[in-house]
Image (tube, rainbow, N blue to C red):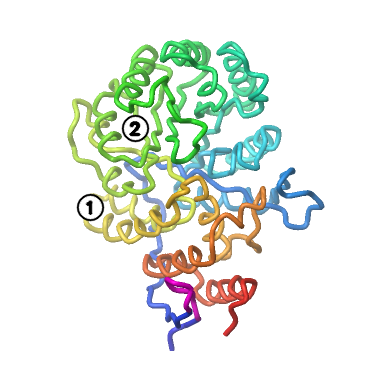
Amino acid sequence: MALSLTLPVAGGALAPYALRGRAPVEPAAGIQFNRIAYSAAHVVADPLAAVDPWLQCAVDWDATIGYRRHLWSLGLGVAEAMDTAQRGMGLDWPTSLELIRRSLEAAKEVPGARVASGCGTDHLDLDGVKNVDDVIRGYEEQMAAIEALDGKLIVMASRALARVAKSPGDYERVYDRILSQAKQPVVLHWLGDMFDPALAGYWGTADVDRAMDTALGIIAAHPDKVDGIKISLLDKDKEIAMRRRLPPGVRMYTGDDFNYAELIAGDGHGSDPMHGRSDALLGIFDAIAPAASAALGELARGNVEKFHAILGPTVPLSRHIFAAPTRFYKTGVVFMAWLNGHQRHFTMVGGQQSTRSLQHFAELFRLADAANLLEQPELAVRRMKTLLALHGVED
């Protein structure tokens, strides 16, 4: 007999729902991917800590690092201390640095484990930032701390820079300075304002094409210092256009949580074979890790149809998790981790479990089932019923 429960539907009514998904796909062991794939990983809050969740962050370190071990076991890299980890949205810089340190230490025990760590300016008091020199000093402080741990940098988009920059030239000055000092090639990070409204007009203009020109110019000036660029604009055509213009050897890391399947598969166009497809640095890979791993394994074997058959059904779930306000997507990612037994509770740093409605969670549950992503269906149903009961819905 199929597992069932009562879920909210449109208009606020309740209706029975019977699970119909199959068992999650099992990734094949030992497959080497032909794409680099980072999962931007979430942090697990400590619900027993005596803190004020809106003001202070408390992390369950064992569960947080345990989830990274899970990602590495699936062949995925970890993009550490990024926005999926609530960086600048509950996770402060001192805790981010501790997270980076612990992740890098754990990675040493896992052969082939990839870690790239977010370097930003979020420790700065925005009201105290007066010019781009302040931004440069902010980046340099975090850069030195991460490189002292032998960490690879992801140079995150800076709210402080977006606030004080007066022209594309200001961006060029900041990035030229940072890239010239980097000890190893970095990943640049272009996060659209749908993810963070404070980043509107990044690269010195609201015109995306002109912004792209500025970013490409910065990369072209330092091609040996740029491993790749992650863009999260939720616009596949812009991403494709930019990746075709990258210098040889510089990767496009898709951050498009709406169109990742087709962007990773690629179209084969571009003067450099690397620019005919995208690598990946995605928040959604946290929530769909087994499917992402299995699909990438099939792609590496040349089974493009199987790649799409596995990954395609996850796209509606991702589009729901990343629905506007997109910046609240972390709540859906953590909800999935809780449903699938990767953490004991559904609480978040900053109390952000409250940013989505019960209707949203109910639809997320249905879409996860349809995508064959419920790893332990009985547990998932039990936990969904717990959430429903907290909202006054009991069978």
Residue 164 image point, x, y percent? 54, 18
Q: Which of 135 and 375 is in front in this view?
A: 135
Label 2 crowd (10 A; few <14 / some 14-19 / many >=20): many
Q: In this view, does 357 lie to the left or right of 264?
A: right
Report the span colored magenta.
6-13
Residue 288 lies, with reference to residue 118, above or below; the image says below
Residue 335 image point, x, y percent? 55, 60
Q: Residue furthest front?
A: 11
Helix, strand or loop for disc 1:
helix
**Residue under numbered circle 2:** 252
Foreground mark, 2 or 1, reads: 2
Q: Is residue 298 left or right of residue 343?
A: left
Q: Which quadrant is the N terminus positioned in?
A: bottom left
Q: Which of 343 and 126 is in front in this view?
A: 126
Residue drawn where x is 58% and y is 13% of the image: 131
Q: Which of 290 and 105 is in front in this view?
A: 290
Residue 335 lies, with reference to residue 57, above or below; the image says below
Residue 300 image point, x, y percent? 29, 47
Q: Is residue 367 left or right of residue 241?
A: right
Find out whether residue 336 is within the magenta segment: no
Q: In this view, does 228 lie to the left or right of 58?
A: left
Q: Which of marks 2 and 1 is nearer the N terminus?
A: 2
Q: Nearer the viewer, residue 152 or 2?
A: 2
Residue drawn where x is 22% and y is 27% of the image: 272
Counting the numbered discs, the total is 2
Disc 2 marks a residue whose amino acid type is Met
Disc 1 marks a residue whose amino acid type is Val
Structural distance between the alpha carbons of marks 2 and 1: 20 Å
Residue drawn where x is 45% and y is 64% of the image: 364
Q: Which quadrant is the C terminus positioned in?
A: bottom right
**Residue under numbered circle 1:** 304
Find out whether residue 8 is within the magenta segment: yes
